[in-house]
Amino acid sequence: MTLRRRNFLKNSLLPSGGAMIFSLPFRADSQAVPGLPASMQQPGKPFSNYGQPSEYEKTVIRWISANAEVPGNGVSWSPLHELAGTITPNGLHFERHHNGVPEIDPKQHEFVISGLVERPLQFSVMDLLRYPMHSRICFIECGGNSNTSWRTEPVQSAAGYTHGLVSNAEWTGVPVKLLLKEAGVKSEAKWVVAEGADGASLNLSIPLEKLLDDAFIALYQNGERLRPENGYPMRLILPGWEGITQVKWLRQLLLVETPAQSRDETAQYTELMPDGKAQQFSFIMQPKSIITSPSVGMVLPDNPGIYQISGLAWSGFGKVAKVEVSCDGGESWQEASLQTPVLDKAFTRFTIGWQWNGETAILQSRVTDEAGNIQPSREMLVTEKGKHNFFHYNAIISWEVDPSGEIFHVYA
Ligand SMILES: Nc1nc2c(c(=O)[nH]1)N[C@H]1C(S)=C(S)[C@@H](COP(=O)(O)O)O[C@H]1N2
Ligand SMILES: [Mo]
C-alpha cells in the first residue's frame, strides 16, 4: 500500500506533501460594465468549504421540544410547511433522542453481531464501508408523530411543528441480510435485539424476518455521511417501520429466541386500546397525508383567488396509490396529481389547483396506498383506538380557511 502510494505521488503532477495550487488560465471577466451600480461591479463573497442556506432563509428551522425533566430527551420537528419536493435536507431531518446525541469517534466505534449465530462478527466503520452498499429513499416516522391530535382541541402550531416527526432521505448502506448470512443464523433465532451506543443503550426487539428482508445499516444520508443527530457513524434503517425500531449509533445486533421486553417496547411505544389493554409491536406505519401548503398559520393573500394545494403522502405498506383532496370538509373529493417517481415506503408529493371563492373552506387530503389501506377520518380512528392512545395517529388532517384568508387547524 505504502509503496504504491509513493509511486502514485512520484508519477503525479502534484508536489508531494505540498498544497495544490491551480493557476488555470481564467478569463479576466470582471471588467467594469457601464451603467451597473458599483456593488454589482465587485466580486461577491469568498467561496466556502461547506455550504449553508441563504441568510434570508434563517427562519426555516427545526422546532425543538426538549423534555425539561430529562436531559437529552426530546424531539425536533421538521418544518414540512416550508419544504418542497420530497427529500428532507439533512440539517432539517426531524430528531428524536432519548438520551441526547453521543459523540462517536468512528475510529473507536465497533459494531457486533452476536447471540444465536454460528460465527459472532465484529466490524469497524472501515470494515463496513468495504461491503457492497445500496441506496434507498424512504421515510422515517416517529410512532409519536401527530400525537397532540389525540387531544380534544386542535393545536394551532405550524403543520411541521405538529406533524413533522417524519422525514424522507436517501440512505446508503449495507444490507443486514448480507452480514447475517456471513454470521450464519442459527435456526432457533427468531428476534434480533438492536442496541445503540447512546446513553441508556436504547434497545429494541425486531423480528428476524424484517432484518432478512429489506433492512440495512446506513452510513450515508443524502449522499454524505450520517449527521451525528441521525446516528453517525451508523444506524439501522427498516423501511416503512416505526421510528423507534431504526436504532441510531448502532453497536449490536443480538440474535435471540424471544423479544427482550425492553423499556421502549413495554412502557413506551405501545398502544393503549379502548379495552384497557396495550398493543405491542405496532411496527408498520399506517398511510398518512398532510396538506403542507396552504396550511395552519398561513394567510391567503387574494380573496377570491387561485391557489396551488401541495402536500405529502406516505405509507409503510408500500407505494401511494392515490391522494384525494377535499375543499369542503369531505363532502366531495378530487384526485390530486402525484409527482413521479412514486417510490415504495417514501414521501410522495401531491398537488392540485384550487379556486377559492372567498368563503369558509375546509381543506383535507386522504391517501390510499397500494395495499388498499385508506387514511381514516379522525372519528373513525378515535372510535377504533379510543381516546387514550398516544401513538400512531394517522387520521385525516383538516385546515379551515376563513374569509379573512387566515388558516386554522380544526377537527372535521
Ligand atoms: N440509539 C437510539 N436510536 C434511536 C433513538 C434513540 O433515542 N436512540 N430514537 C428512536 C426514535 S423514537 C425515532 S423516531 C428515530 C428518529 O430518528 P431521527 O432522529 O434520525 O429522525 O430514531 C430511533 N432510534
Ligand atoms: Mo420515535
Image (tube, rainbow, N blue to C red):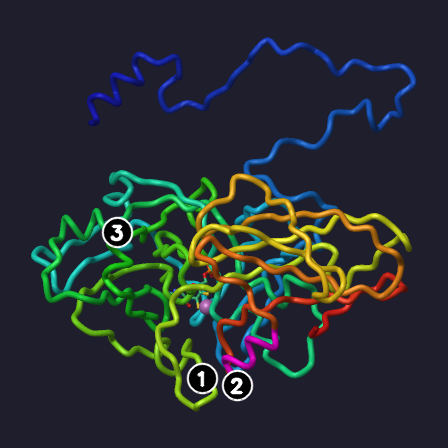
Which disc number belongs to residue 108?
Answer: none
Q: Which residue is mark 1?
A: 272
* Image position, residue 304 (x, y; %): 90, 54
Region rendered in magenta: 378-388
Mark 3 → mark 1, Cα distance in angstroms: 32 Å
Q: Which residue is mark 3?
A: 176
Question: N-terminal of the two: label 3 or label 1?
Answer: 3
Q: In which quadrant is the N terminus drawn?
A: top left
- SS at badge 2: loop
Question: N-terminal of the two: label 2 or label 1?
Answer: 1
Instruction: State which quadrant residue 300 falls in.
Output: bottom right
Helix, strand or loop: magenta stretch: helix
Q: Which residue sits at x=62%, y=43%?
A: 52
The three-letter code of the residue at mark 1 reads: Leu
Which disc number belongs to residue 388?
Answer: 2
Q: Which residue sits at x=70%, y=32%?
A: 45
Q: In which quadrant is the C terminus drawn?
A: bottom right
Mark nearest the camera among 3 and 1 is: 1
